[in-house]
Image (tube, rainbow, N blue to C red):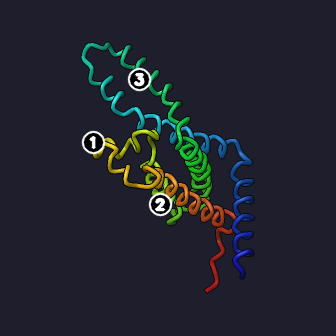
Amino acid sequence: MTIVNRISARFRHLLSALKETFSTTEGWLVAFGGFAFILLFAAVLSNLKLLGFIAQEDYFSLGLKLKAALQTLWGGRVTFLHKGGPLTLALAVLFGINVAFIVRYMRRQVRMHRAAGASALGVLVGLLGVGCAACGSALFASLLGTGSALAALPLRGQEFTWLGIALVLLSTFSLARKLVEPEACARP
């Protein structure tokens, strides 16, 4: 089988799996839930220090803390306007599709295979790159104290987002094949 035929087969599997998964309301809801989870997680990561300050401040009432936290998270949508924002949105879309595939696949199979693990790994690696273009990755900045370690990287931490997207894409194609051909094994 040539490379072109393999790629063509992968895309046919993907289209069939997308049709099957999103033919139900459940598929759409699960995908939206995965998408929203990544967006919320990215907003929290980019505002982690401010949210920590709000939570620890003794002078704020509980109501004021909740209101300030919600306004901070709503203001976190600005996170997606910087240079790495479209990558985070792409990761969220792919994660939503991947979660819908996993749920569909789990309904068919009793045991999960390695494809779901690759998806989770891809998202975790991809989220390492979430942050602003000026100061770099929020997670690395909080772990290292500064974003200076990311300054040495050519894309200032966005490498992790690209790697995460690649891993989630690989997982998505793998799950699509398993959804379309669940009982078929590759010939040696």
Task: Identify the amino acid type marked 3.
Answer: Ala
Could you say which disc has been placed on residue 117 in the image? 2
* Residue 82 in the image: above or below residue 187: above
Question: Residue 96's x, y, as percent?
Answer: 59, 47
| Few, some or many residues within 10 Å of mark 3 (<14, 14–19, 20+) | many
3D distance between C-alphas at marks 3 and 1: 23 Å
Kindly identify the residue that appears in the image at 75 percent across and 64 percent down: 12
Q: Quadrant of residue 7?
A: bottom right
Q: Which mark is residue 69?
A: 3
Residue 29 position within the rendered picture, expressed as x and y whole percent measured from the top left: 63, 40
Of residue 55 and residue 141, the one placed in the foreground of this image is: 141
Give the residue type at disc 1: Gly
Report, in whole angstroms, how far the alpha carbon at label 2 lies from the one at label 3. 32 Å
Q: Secondary structure at mark 3?
A: helix
Badge 2 crowding class, 10 Å Cα cut-off, few under 14, some 14 to 19, many 20 or more, is few
**Residue in the image at 53% along x and 37% along y:** 82
Q: Using the image, tell me which numbered label, if any, was put on residue 145.
A: 1
Picture quarter with the C terminus: bottom right
The residue furthest left is 58
Q: How many marks?
A: 3
Q: Up-down: is 132 above or below 125?
A: above
CA–CA distance between discs 2 and 1? 30 Å
